[in-house]
Amino acid sequence: MIDYNHTVVVFLLLSLGIFKLGSCTENQSQINYVTVKRIQSEREALVSFKNGVNDTPGKLSSWVGEDYCQWKGVECDYKSGHVIKLNLSNPAGRCRHYDYNYEGRVTETGRCPHCNTPPKRCCFYSMRSSLDGDVKASLSGDENASFSGKISPYLGNLSSLRYLNLEGHYDLSTKNLDWVSSLSSLEYLYMGKVKINHTKGDWLHAINMLPSLQELSLCSCQLEHLPSSLTFLNFSSLEVLDLSYNSFNTSIPQWLFNLTSLTKLDLTFSNQGGKILDSFGRLGNLQYLYLGGNRFYGSIPASIGNLSSLNELDLSYNQMNGTIPESFGQLSELANLYLLENSWDGVITEAQLMNLTSLEEFMLTTNKNQPLVFNVTHNWFSPFTLKSLHLESCIIGPKFPSWLQVQSELTHVTLKNVGIIGIIPEDWFFMISPQLTHLDLSNNQIKGNLLHQLVFPNVTKLFLQSNLLSGPIPSNINDLMPNLQYLDLSDNHLYGKIPLSISKIKYLNILVLRKNNLSGELPYHWNESQIDLRVVDVSYNNLCGKIPSSMGFLGNLSILVLSNNNLSGEIPSSLQNCSLVSIDFGGNKLSGNLPSWLESDIFMLRLRSNLFSGIIPRKWCNLYKLGILDLAQNNLSGHIPDCLNNFTAMVDYNNSGYKSVENYTEKAHIVTKGREYEYDRILQFVTCIDLSGNSLTGGIPINITSLTRLGTLNLSMNHLTGNIPKNIENLRWLETLDLSNNSLSGPIPESMSSLTSLAHLNLSFNNLTGRIPSGNQLQTLNDVTIYKGNPSLCGSPLLTKCPGDETSDGPTIIRVDDKQGGDDYERIWFYASIGIGFVVGFWSVCGTLLLKKSWRHCYFHFCDDIKDRIALLIALKVVHLKRKFGLEKN
């Protein structure tokens, strides 16, 4: 009985299981049918995208088969089968952050590889003018991982998509964003660097159809229109908005201030202008506000104090010319404040700083003549603990402020041109020395000796130039600062020798000791371990001895400035192992022949005022990047090479070998316009050939006139012969031409009057003949000394008259046909105008009388009337005279 019951129970359970299994199978079949139908349409949308782009990096190689939820970058909701996430970003080119390098520029830090001016969030090709070289080549990572082609509008069929990221594909474009408006569930949209072709504001109207949108990034999408109004605001839940690196050329639209959920707003380098409005105070949830690199002006609005959650604010590189409001003191959450490169004025007191308890990074520079002044009481205690401080061209002095002396966690300090006078407290140096990595106290009046006892184990950058520091450089500087990369002690009163240990600083990149009182010889133990050393500038000191041949071990040395010392001997040939682009050895006692081993990358070669002899090497014809050649005041002989036209950098600036070096501004003294000028920031644009004060012979090479960008040509005080090149007018940018004190002959070319940029000319003491040309720029160069010492020259401004000129003292009437040098066309037009005037005058009167009868009768009637009146007057006059003299007959 028990077995029977068990059998029945088992049978019933199995029957029930089979029924349920059949029911489940039928339901599952129905579910699969619905899912497959939806999957097919979305799969086709993805395939359409793949077919529309050039996938050279092969990122879509996994996009095969039917199960697209397994494709790379695709994420599905497996309950519904819909695509909910599509992430195909290019990490090598996507929007990224940047850091300031505490000179007011941008550093790479692995994130912003090619910006030279600070934006805040992205570095893109739309700022092409600020880049050096091809943008794509400058991107970090694998630049070849970028798609090209067009985005298929069928992506709009992914109706459940919540996340779409196509950022960083600089060769990807879309006809418009109409297809985006179909993605009604979209919450995150990142399309930075994708080219969006649009008609005015249609891109915004498409975005406005996304009610769930929380984050939007259209950074550097070549957008040009930002509508000022919207009929309704549908994406009011937006939290992150990035429109940086576009060219809107507008002011901030009012609808933006209705996005009260915004936590991050980035309009960096978006060509915005106008005043920063009080309406920003309505965005109370903002944590990050980036408005740098635009055209905003005026003061910061007082409503900024309403942004109680603000963590980071960037207003750098604008035209702000007002004050910083007291309401700044309410931003208790503010950690990073960037106010670089504006024209701030007014006064900062405790009120603007009193509640900035979270402040860690503070950067402010002003370029106004009346600088911003920090006016806080001497014993004021700051509420913040800074890690980075950059203040430039504002006033915090004259004494080193007490509120800075308690900042114990500083790692980066720039106090440049802030009016500090006197000595910096040693206690402050001791307090910050363990963690300090960057110190810039340049352009002040800081006194005292360089501190020998301080140890800066982590300092990489030390800038103390343009102060009143004295004493020797510490002999153990390599032990005090073993990680030093940038050292600039120029323009001080340092004395003693350059310590040998300076050549043991392994990571040294830039060494600048210019304009001090240093003596002795250059360190002679340079070695291959200093592979990073790129700049050595020890000019304007009292150094003696020879240039060490060991400097040839510095393979990456590109700028070597040893000018204005007492160095002697020859230039060591070992320097050819360096990567020199700028050599300035002027003002020494160097001798021997000119180095023929120079490579084509040289931009500046300045060897003036030395004892060099021999000829100018013909191998220098290969220096096509040369922009400045200064060999003046040596003992050179021989001819000027006839291949100077190979200096193509003096024709096309793009061929220049000049390469700027971060944290170093090269300076050079160039003789031009009759005086010596110091060039620094514009040195790269200077073009000059100065061979004066030698014993060069032969003629002026004709092909020198092909250097159309040449600014200064000085060949004076040599033994040059021959004529001045006739086609000298090709040097259209020439500002200085000095050919004086030679033996040049022949006439001054008429074409010289076409040199419209010429500001300084000297042709004195030659054997030039003939009339001095006139007209255009030469009219303004009327100094007699320009032509002095050429006895066969004549004409203005000299008193010597040319043959055929009038010599009488009375006024001279010059007829048109006697005008010297007159133009034939002028005479033709003169006589033609007389004839035309006569014909027009004659026939305008006579022709009218001939053709119009009534006028003719009127005219002759008038003549008869006049004739009768005259006859009557004569008769009456005769009668009057006869009566007067009694001649009338009775």
Image: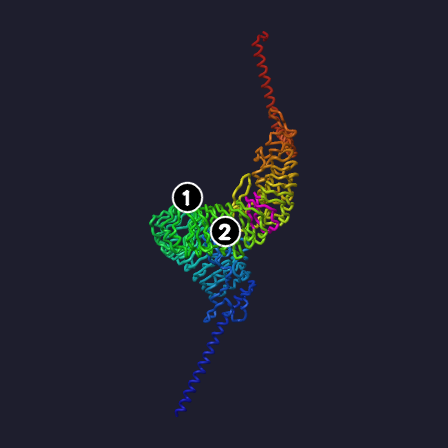
- Is the C-beta separation of discs 2 and 1 under 8 Å? no
Q: CA distance from mark 2 to mark 1?
A: 33 Å
Determine which residue is flagged by label 1: 370
Measured as percent of width and height from the top left, residue 726 is found at 65, 40
Q: Residue 120: within the magenta? A: no
The C terminus: image quadrant: top right
Which residue lies at the image location 40% right of the left edge and 90% below the top edge?
5
Segment colored magenta:
581-610
Which label sits on residue 511?
A: 2
Q: In the figure, is residue 464 to the left or right of 685?
A: left
Element carrying mark 2 = strand
Q: Where residue 249 sits in the image (x, y, percent)?
A: 48, 50
Q: How many other residues sit within 10 Å of disc 2, few (<14), some (14-19) or many (≥20)?
A: many
Q: Position of residue 301 (x, y in %)?
A: 39, 50
Element carrying mark 1:
loop
Which amino acid, mark 2? Answer: Leu
Identify the amino acid type marked 1. Gln
**Occupied quadrant, residue 186:** bottom left
Mark 1 residue crowding within 10 angstroms, few (<14) / some (14–19) / many (20+): some
- Give 686 or 44, whichever is nearer the viewer: 686
Is residue 593 one of those drawn in magenta? yes
Comparing marks 2 and 1, which lies closer to the viewer?
2
